[in-house]
Image: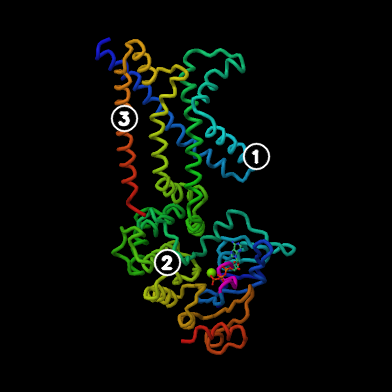
Amino acid sequence: MTWSVMIFKLSEGMLESVKIFTLTLLFSLPLGLFVAFGRMSKNLLLRNFVRLYISIMRGTPLILQLMVIYFGPFYIFNITLSSGYRFYAVIIGFVINYAAYFAEIYRGGIESMPVGQYEAAKVLGYSKAQTFIRIILPQVIKRILPSITNEVITLIKDTALAFAISYAEMFTVAKAIAAAQTNMTAFIIAGIFYYVFNLIVDFIMGWIEKKLSYYR
Amino acid sequence: MKVNLLEIKNLKKSFGTLEVIKGISLNVEEGKVVSIIGPSGSGKSTLLRCATLLETIDSGELIYLGEHATTDIDGKASYAHKAQLKRIQSYFGLVFQNFNLFPHFSVIKNVIDALITVQKKPKDEAMEIGRGLLKKVGLADKEDAYPYQLSGGQQQRVSIARALALNPKILFFDEPTSALDPELTGEILNVIKELAAEKMTMVIVTHEMSFARDVSDHIIFMDNGVIVEEGSPSKVINNPENERTKAFLSRFES
Ligand SMILES: Nc1ncnc2c1ncn2[C@@H]1O[C@H](COP(=O)(O)OP(=O)(O)OP(=O)(O)O)[C@@H](O)[C@H]1O
Ligand SMILES: [Mg+2]
């Protein structure tokens, strides 16, 4: 295999990794907020259900969750799904796992807000929704950004776990090339790709953090 | 003509088994300044929080401009429906001890955001109101600053401007100078005095006795959840009759 072919194949894999990364954030960041609402709900049933969901997501390996989501329909319900399901299984697995982590971060941020902010808004006549969207959420986002950055960085590396269900992201591709060539080259290039990906994300998160540092 | 902007009738409020407000009645007439004094823990803040709908009262009546926020039904307070409470909410403003400004909004935005978001005023009209109020509290040059860049006294003046922006008929203050360094209290008291001169109706919880005497039409001395003594400043502060009032005021000899 020539260098250019190898780089091309790894880049294709990288594109899949970026796809998993982007779609996971796109869905799990908003979903996490709703999960956090459920976790803080006054409804005991809902609250405990969400608590159980979060504890399972955080208490079992993501790699195992991916397996269950991918193979579950067949082994449990005897449903045979098309090969396209592999992609959906990856996205579903990552989204529901990361939503649980994000939910706990949101909850921590929301609960750390001083009650005086709610009271000031209430006396000024803001509705509950207006208070949350205009007053609370912007401040929560600033407070939780460092924790979010941690999760986002972890997610880059976690995308490699999709290899468990043979999804052709970069790590899966690198593994196949390395096995065929019986050397480490593909792994080293993949490592560099992951690292550069990381640097870019780190730069973007740093930029957002700076944007939000106009107040204290 | 006497118009009662606020009538409180036999208000009671407990936290669990602790009864904090034990049946308080008072009227606030249009254009008057009422000050509430009393020892720590006597229930002054709780009374203000009940009046501003931040706490749910157990029994009694809260009436703003003749509109019932609560009605007493068999000794239990029953609140009006949401739309009516929303309207009543717009009759009053509240200035907090620790300001509670919105830190992510600039000074001008703190003052006008509710005008735009809640009252749906057009932005340029809101800006005009906001700038006028900042000028009034002496902060015209701080429009674009953020709260963290201001002194405590300046922050409190912004919060007064924020409350005034919605054009309330009655303004409550809960110890507006208690969180401030002593040298900064004067600037707040002057703003309040100016409002009093303009006949703004105000209810002020304060520990500043000489200020209360100067600015108030009526003084209420509270202790242990009840009104112990009330009347004109010259009566309550200069010639108190009740022993508890005397004991309390003796700590403020000036
Ligand atoms: N949310 C609450 N839960 C339980 N108890 C409360 C609550 N808020 C106030 N209290 C109690 O109610 C009593 C009156 O408190 P309040 O804050 O109204 O007093 P205050 O007169 O404003 O005192 P200060 O001059 O110190 O501000 C106190 O015993 C206080 O501990
Ligand atoms: Mg108090």
Are callouts 2 and 3 both on one chain? Answer: no
State the CA–CA distance, disc 3 to disc 1. Answer: 43 Å
- Could you tell me residue A3's position as x and y percent? 25, 14
Judging from the image, mark 1 belongs to the subunit labelled: A
The Cα atoms of the two marked residues, 2 and 3, are separated by 52 Å
Judging depth in this view, the residue of A187 and B107 nearest the camera is A187
**Sequence order check, earlier mark of 3 and 1:** 1
Q: Residues within 10 Å of mark 2 (few under 14, many from 20)?
A: many
Kindly identify which residue carries mark 3.
Answer: A195
- Which residue carries the number 2 mark? B160
Tell me the kind of residue under disc 1: Leu
Give neighbour class at mark 3: few <14, some 14-19, many 20+ (Cα, 10 Å).
Answer: some
Query: Looking at the image, is B39 positioned above or below residue B128?
Result: below
Task: Determine the CA span between mark 2 and mark 1.
Answer: 43 Å
Q: Closer to the camera: disc 2 or disc 3? A: 3
Residue type highlighted by circle 2: Ile
Query: Chain ID for label 3?
Result: A
Residue at the bottom extreme, as displayed:
B239
Name which quarter of the figure residue A153 lies in: top left
Q: Report which residue position mark 1 lands on.
A: A45
Q: Residue at x 54, y 60 (%)?
A: B89
> In the image, is residue B140 part of the stretch drawn in magenta?
no
Question: Does the closest atom of ligand 2 sit within 8 Å of the Cβ of label 2?
Answer: no
Residue segment shown in magenta: B40-46
